Amino acid sequence: MTFKPRSIAPWKPTRGVWITCLFGIAILLASLSIAVSVGAVVVPVKTVWGILANKAAPGAVAADWSAGREAIVWNIRLPRAILACLVGAGLAIVGASLQAVTRNPLADPHLLGISAGGAFGAILALLHTGLFLGGLTVPLLAFLGSLGAILIVLAVTQFAAATSADRLVLAGVAVSFIVMSAANLLIFLGDPRATHTVVFWMLGGLGLAGWDQLIYPAVILLGCGAYLWLRSGHLNAMTVGDETATTLGIPVARFRLTIFVIGALITGVMVAFSGVIGFVGLMIPHIVRLMVGGDYRRLLPISALCGAVFLLWADIVARTIMAPDDMPIGIVTGLIGGVFFVWLLRRQIR
């Protein structure tokens, strides 16, 4: 599979794009309703929306539900569902952006070692340094870990003179193994009483989501996502090639490094609150390209919507397949992503 040149002319959303986005938002809201409704205790969708309406405007709906159900919806399931949306959207746009600047359809924060670096930084904060900056400690160290991992990958490719797109992924996989080994060493050296929780978190999970934590991934996603969309013309040019992008006045090396830093920032913050969730950034952009093409002006927002919906449903499966126990969501995405990866390799060979 190779990237085809994309138009970088001024673009106006067509009616079809607006319809696709509205349809995606409708599916997202429906999926969000179902995600909050299902679980060990089933809460009717009507009750879910009634609780949300009363939170927005007290007394708007007659409260015919118990305080326990309201606590389940508002304090547990809704923050978890929103976190799933933020993480899925963030990983999807990171994967799409990395695939543009590396011109590699296999580029993904998981395969390039960025997720492993985020996990290393988060584990360092949770088990060794303590929350010396309060709630900012874990996402900050996770970001630094992700940034360090991608910089190591770039250094390895330069050292080995492996500048091709395929070699970049191989270097990322190698660095990912090394960084995860270091993360496992941190777990081994940490407090045994906390290691079980950290190991479960590393497998990917949204069970610790809370309203006080959502501000960090939300702000990072909105800020970085807006920047990436405003630079979608640059991303389109990068898929054509460095020479073409340079002739258009794009500082290729600096822009590529900027995308790597933004990818590390988004991935690190998402990993800090959800653990390591793989393959979302690999699968979603490819699926969206099949639906709407490769123009990043529509690829990025629709990838964000599809990533949010996908991770919502992955979380629904993780919560219900072994109810009342939670299966780590990383297991679900790993199973689906592994099959997709094989399919993608087969498609490339053809």
Image (cartoon, helix red, strand yellow):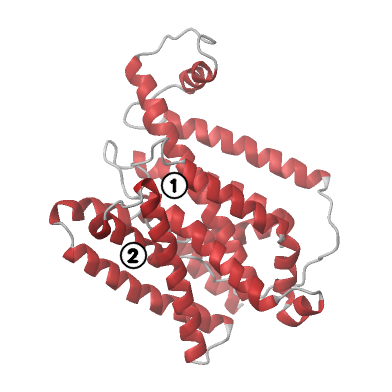
Report which residue position mark 1 lands on: 314
Report which residue position mark 2 lands on: 120
| Residue drawn where x is 60% and y is 50% of the image | 223
Up-down relation of residue 234 to residue 223 (above or below): below
Cα distance in 3D space between marks 1 and 2: 24 Å
| Residue drawn where x is 77% and y is 72% of the image | 5
Asked whether residue 207 is in view, the answer is yes
Quadrant of the frame with the C terminus: bottom right
Residue closer to the observer: 336 or 193: 193
Up-down relation of residue 147 to residue 297 (above or below): below
Up-down relation of residue 44 to residue 251 (above or below): above
Numbered tag placed on residue 54 in the rendering: none
Give the residue type that dot 1 points to: Ala
Q: Position of residue 84 (x, y in %)?
A: 46, 44
Q: Position of residue 256 (x, y in %)?
A: 62, 73
Q: Position of residue 38 (x, y in %)?
A: 40, 31
Q: Are marks 1 and 2 in contact (CB under 8 Å)?
A: no
Residue furthest front as drawn: 132
Give the residue type that dot 2 points to: Phe
